[in-house]
């Protein structure tokens, strides 16, 4: 079999396979063998397009012996930062390390004290939890992952005093550009909306300070709907449903720390999930019926395969806390794609009562077979270490599988096996977006309806040139080939914008009954939709038992990744060499030097510290050069190269080595802000909000600010106000001045 045969000569599909999942020039057969890990059954399932692993497994499995630091997991949840500066920055380092291995991350900031709370340092009060979101976002954009950026979800609890600021942050299109955001909404919050009650937003610091804020519930809810209507974010996570509808809800040792970037995976601190999807479109017979027996066989093979990958990939997680969590809980995430294609093949309209009945039967088969297979694996390999029989069988989720019919021998057998052998996995089913793998196989994504019968996709990140593809799902093309026009397809063919959102929610709710994790799915609304529509969606989603909901209105200010004129962009990758400016200045009583790397004349990275002549024997006449990234047997370093007045090339090796190591660690984080494209005056503001207990670090911080300020265009308004008259200061010549009273400050 050739790749052209396997992917039906689809140019986009072949491009995705070659550029995202194939290793170098390996053949399709070699790829099948590598990805399946020697499991012949799963290899045949992949060849038949009945099952396929998530993208990280497809790209990385079997390559750990190639001296590559990679993971098989698509997603992680990082332990939430504690309420101190060291933990906040340590969390940033964990994100960076995880991104570098290819994993996406979720992080919750509810533990961080709100704006205005007291701190015992030079700042006296904190800038708040929300102020650190840009920092985490820029780290995400900085770390490249083979043609794509990292992915990040930032969440916050609905009872945090900074809630309103969090909700509104993305109304500034320059803020938090590399992360999704969601609010963890409680039943209490939703009930207060219905009843028209007030809420007390509360935070208690480690010093005992209590910060409270009384708000009306409905205006907050309205703001959530308005922001989503206009900016497509934040999303909503129904946290009580997430924590109660799973196989771990009774386990006192377990708690969810957050969700992954697409929100289909609630996970504990350090938690990770391996993804795989069943292509439902392949289980419709030529007679137009659903082959549940074949589906059962594929589910069994998929659960076994994901457990094999879990064991194989255990040492490949970036952080020890991740390795520990995965070993303890053994989460896997088996989901579906091609659901919309399956319904079209069955001639059933997506969203109809009949479609929900079909989905009900599929969902039941998914969870029952997955649990049965996990129990069989537990019998031979042992249950997951934290398994507790009584906790599991008494969860509302597990008990819901009992039909109550004494003749239901299948559930009774499952109950007996779980009691006797346990389960190999604490979490089994999810429903991921499946964007790239579904497009590669030519089917609809996840449990989504068809987005459009045809659309154009720009794939700048997959190849070194812009390419545009008109994409049809194969079933639509087949109908067109049979004589239908794109404008007059059968009545059972509907796109996402044509489906009433009430039907859309009911479909997701039907599937969610059987999914122990969650579902990533977006309700697409036409441009004419109102804020009231979004409010109604939120209420219905909560009432129907969804774990979360995402809404995208056509024409909103924040574009989607995939649209009829979509653009997929790759974050700027650092060239081997960048232009550099050399800046010498006074920092207090000390002589300092800064090497500032530039791309298109804008600061991209910074190395700065005390200008020791022994470390920096560079003539004072030298003000520019290049910063060169070097990789050798000793690792990665950055050198400064310049041309002297005689025309000779000189090179100073290892800028990161020369400066204080503590400076260097924080400098990498500042560089992340610069590389994220944030306006320089805002970078200065963020740096200004960093307060350290160490005097040397605060001195370094001031030096960084001084260096960056020299690149700010004259006339830009500073975030600082004049201490004499209270007017905002203006940047001029790297200093800030007051145009009202003449006050000036440099440094």
Image (spheres, rainbow, N blue to C red):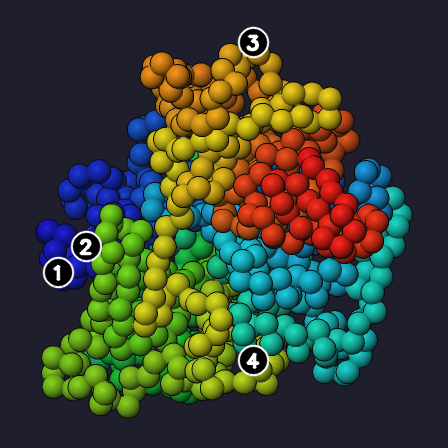
For the residue pair 384 and 58, the one nearer the viewer reads as 58
For the residue pair 369 and 269, the one nearer the viewer reads as 269
- What secondary structure is marked by label 2? helix
Instruction: Looking at the image, tell me whether mark 4 or mark 3 is earlier in sequence order.
Output: 4
Depth check, mark 4 against mark 3: the one in front is 3
Mark identifier at residue 9: 1
Does 641 appear above or below 404?
above
Q: CA distance from mark 1 to mark 3?
A: 63 Å
Instruction: Looking at the image, tell me whether mark 4 or mark 2 is earlier in sequence order.
Output: 2
Q: Would residue 406 be visible to someone looking at this image? A: no
The C terminus lies in which quarter of the figure?
Answer: top right
Q: Which residue is mark 3?
A: 614
Residue 292, position in %: x, y?
Answer: 31, 70
Quadrant for residue 60, please give it: top left
At 38% across and 20% down in the image, what residue appears? 643
Depth check, mark 1 against mark 3: the one in front is 3
Q: Residues within 10 Å of mark 4 (few under 14, many from 20)?
A: many
Instruction: Looking at the image, tell me whether mark 1 or mark 4 is earlier in sequence order.
Output: 1
Q: Which residue is mark 2?
A: 14
């Amino acid at each position: 079999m050739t790749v052209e045969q396997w992917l039906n000569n689809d140019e986009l599909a072949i491009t995705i396979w070659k550029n995202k999942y194939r290793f170098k020039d390996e053949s399709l057969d070699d790829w099948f063998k590598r990805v399946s890990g020697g499991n012949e059954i799963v290899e045949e399932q992949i060849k038949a397009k009945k099952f396929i692993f998530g993208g990280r497994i497809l790209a990385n499995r079997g390559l750990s012996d190639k001296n590559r630091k990679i993971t098989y997991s698509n997603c992680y949840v990082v332990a939430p930062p504690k309420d101190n500066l060291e933990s906040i920055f340590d969390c940033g380092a964990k994100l960076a390390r995880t991104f570098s291995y290819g994993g996406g991350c979720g992080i919750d900031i509810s533990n961080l004290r709100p704006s205005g709370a007291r701190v015992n340092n030079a700042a006296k009060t904190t800038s708040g939890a929300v102020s650190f979101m840009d920092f985490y976002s820029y780290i995400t954009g900085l770390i490249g992952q083979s043609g794509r950026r990292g992915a990040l979800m930032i969440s916050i609890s609905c009872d945090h005093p900074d809630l309103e600021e969090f909700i509104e942050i993305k109304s500034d299109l320059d803020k938090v550009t590399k992360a999704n955001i969601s609010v963890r909404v409680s039943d209490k919050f939703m009930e207060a909306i219905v009843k028209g009650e007030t809420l007390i937003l509360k935070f208690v610091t480690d010093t005992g300070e209590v910060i409270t804020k009384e708000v009306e519930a409905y205006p907050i809810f309205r703001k959530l709907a308005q922001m989503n209507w206009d900016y497509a974010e934040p999303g909503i996570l129904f946290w009580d449903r997430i924590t109660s509808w799973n196989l771990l809800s009774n386990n006192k040792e377990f708690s969810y720390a957050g969700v992954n970037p697409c929100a289909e995976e609630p996970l504990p601190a350090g938690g990770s999930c391996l993804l795989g999807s069943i292509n439902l479109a392949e289980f419709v017979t030529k007679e137009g019926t659903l082959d549940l027996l074949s589906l059962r066989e594929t589910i069994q093979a998929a659960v076994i395969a994901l457990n094999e990958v879990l064991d194989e990939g255990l040492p490949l997680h970036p952080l020890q806390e991740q390795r520990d969590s995965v070993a303890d809980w053994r989460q896997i995430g088996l989901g579906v794609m091609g659901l919309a294609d399956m319904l079209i093949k069955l001639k059933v309209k997506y969203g109809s009562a009949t479609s929900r009945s079909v989905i009900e039967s599929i969902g039941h088969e998914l969870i029952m077979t997955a649990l049965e297979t996990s129990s069989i694996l537990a019998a031979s390999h042992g249950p997951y270490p934290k398994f507790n029989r009584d906790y599991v069988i008494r969860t509302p989720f597990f008990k819901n599988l009992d039909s109550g019919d004494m003749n239901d021998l299948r559930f009774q057998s499952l109950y007996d096996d779980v009691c006797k052998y346990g389960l190999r996995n604490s979490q089994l089913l999810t429903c991921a977006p499946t964007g790239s793998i579904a497009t590669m196989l030519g089917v609809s994504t996840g449990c989504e309806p068809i987005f459009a019968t045809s659309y154009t996709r720009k794939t700048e990140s997959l190849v070194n040139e812009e390419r545009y593809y008109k994409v049809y799902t194969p079933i639509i093309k087949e109908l067109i080939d049979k004589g239908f026009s794109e404008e007059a397809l059968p009545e059972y063919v509907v796109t996402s914008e044509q489906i009433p959102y009430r039907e859309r929610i009911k479909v997701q709710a039907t599937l969610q009954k059987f999914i122990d994790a969650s579902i990533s799915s977006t309700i697409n609304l036409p441009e004419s939709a109102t804020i009231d529509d979004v409010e109604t969606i939120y209420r219905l989603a909560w009432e129907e038992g969804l774990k979360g909901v995402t809404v995208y209105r056509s024409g909103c200010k924040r574009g989607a990744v995939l649209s009829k004129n979509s653009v997929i962009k790759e974050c700027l990758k650092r060239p081997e060499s960048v232009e550099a400016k050399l800046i010498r200045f006074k920092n207090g009583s000390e002589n300092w030097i800064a090497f500032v790397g530039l791309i298109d004349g804008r600061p991209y990275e910074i190395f700065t510290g005390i200008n020791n002549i022994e470390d920096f024997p560079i003539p004072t006449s030298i003000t520019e050069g290049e910063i060169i990234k070097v990789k050798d047997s000793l690792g990665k370093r950055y050198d400064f190269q310049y041309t002297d007045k005689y025309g000779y090339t000189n090179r100073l090796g290892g800028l990161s080595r020369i400066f204080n190591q503590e400076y260097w660690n924080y400098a990498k984080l500042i560089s992340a802000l610069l590389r994220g494209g944030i306006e320089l005056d805002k970078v200065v503001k963020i740096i200004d909000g960093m307060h350290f207990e160490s005097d040397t670090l605060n001195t370094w911080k001031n030096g960084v600010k001084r260096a960056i300020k020299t690149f700010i265009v004259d006339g830009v308004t500073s975030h600082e106000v004049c201490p004499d008259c209270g007017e905002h200061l203006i940047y001029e010549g790297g200093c800030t001045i007051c145009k009202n009273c003449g006050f000036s400050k440099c440094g």
